[in-house]
Image: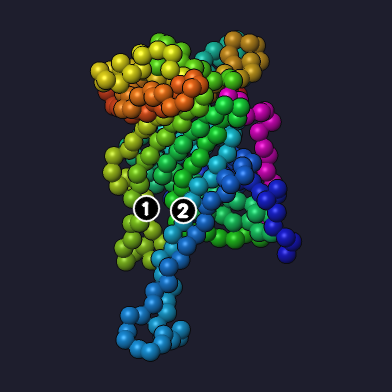
Amino acid sequence: MSLGMGNESWAGFSEESTWGTEGTPRTKFLPLLRGGDGLGVSEDPIISDRMAVGVKASTDFNLGPISVNGDIEVEVYPEGIEMLLDHAMGAVATTQPDVTNDPTVYQHVFSLSDALQDGKGLSVEIDRGAAVFVYTGCKVDSMRLSARLNEYLKARFSLVGKDQVIEASPSTPTFPAMNPYVFTEGVFKWGVTTVGISNATIELRNNLDSDRRTTVSGRNILEPVRGRKREVTFECEVEFDSTALVVDFRAATSRALQLKYTGDVIAAGSYSQTFQIDMAVAKITEAMPQARDEGRIVYTVRGTAFIETANEMTITVINTVTSV
């Protein structure tokens, strides 16, 4: 066995038609970031509580519950992240905006779903050089999108799953050919006003019940379902050049929020590679600029998205991928 090296590591994904049964072949591949491989398995042993001087391995020890969980972090490319978004959000609608003039352009609108891919899961392959690990029955418990000054747009997915196997040989990965979205390609809007930000995070928490166990599940879990209502929150840092955000905070004003990244022009030129996050109804829950030193005042704005005529958030991706 060769020595495992981080520079040889990547993640591959495939959809399972039946939750927990490995889906093959892998159809999406993404490079992992430094610190971006946190997915693993734990097995808590069952040890007897009998009152004795020692514990016998032959009679007092048994294999316990299997738990698969952890994070993977990737950069957001114009193409390649669609499957993860689908399983984080729960539903997607794919259309061709202009099939006559731009036949290679596809628009994917990801929306939140209560069922969250009921009966399906993800198989996640992590190549760690010395061996390849496959995690089955994975569900996205939370997704965190991070836009930071002088960085690429990043996505961290917290996964829960059913089991892990070690396979003999890795898949042959095909990575995205384009660069990830960079910070300067993003535009942040609060209502109709463009706001200059130095960083922003948007988080979806599906709040799954990931410890469903009964006598029929054996050592594994049953398919995770929602344990409580989902949450969509946002946070950003802004310069204090207006009281508008503070006034909206104090008045509990509802506004639309949008973070839109625009990349290269596609084909005929009517459309560009796009990654767009929309919250139809958002409220600021914290906004208080404070003078802490003699320099410019930068403060943190936090808020939450709500359900009104639509669910809390949609993500729109425009690229040349024909189907998710």
Of the pair 271 and 74, the residue shown nearer to us: 74
Please, what secondary structure does the residue beneath circle 2 have? strand
The residue at which mark 1 appears reads as 210
Q: Which residue is at 73% across, 64% downward?
A: 1
The residue furthest front is 294
Q: Are marks 1 and 2 in contact (CB under 8 Å)?
A: yes
Q: Is residue 234 above or below residue 163?
A: above
Report the amino acid beneath label 1. Answer: Ser
Give how far apart the Cα atoms at labels 1 and 2 are.
9 Å
Q: Earlier in the sequence, mark 1 or mark 2?
A: 2
Is 199 colored magenta in this rendering? no
Of the pair 183 and 138, the residue shown nearer to us: 183
Q: Is residue 6 above or below residue 99?
A: below
Report the amino acid beneath label 2. Answer: Asn
Q: Residues within 10 Å of mark 2 (few under 14, many from 20)?
A: many
Residue 113 visible in image: yes
Is 174 colored magenta in this rendering? yes
Residue 73 drawn at (x, y percent): 55, 42
Q: Which residue is at 59% across, 16% downward?
A: 272
Residue 28 drawn at (x, y percent): 60, 40
> Tag on residue 69?
2
* Residues in magenta, as a range: 169-183
- The answer to which image quadrant residue 93 occupies is top left
Please, what secondary structure does the residue beneath circle 1 have? loop
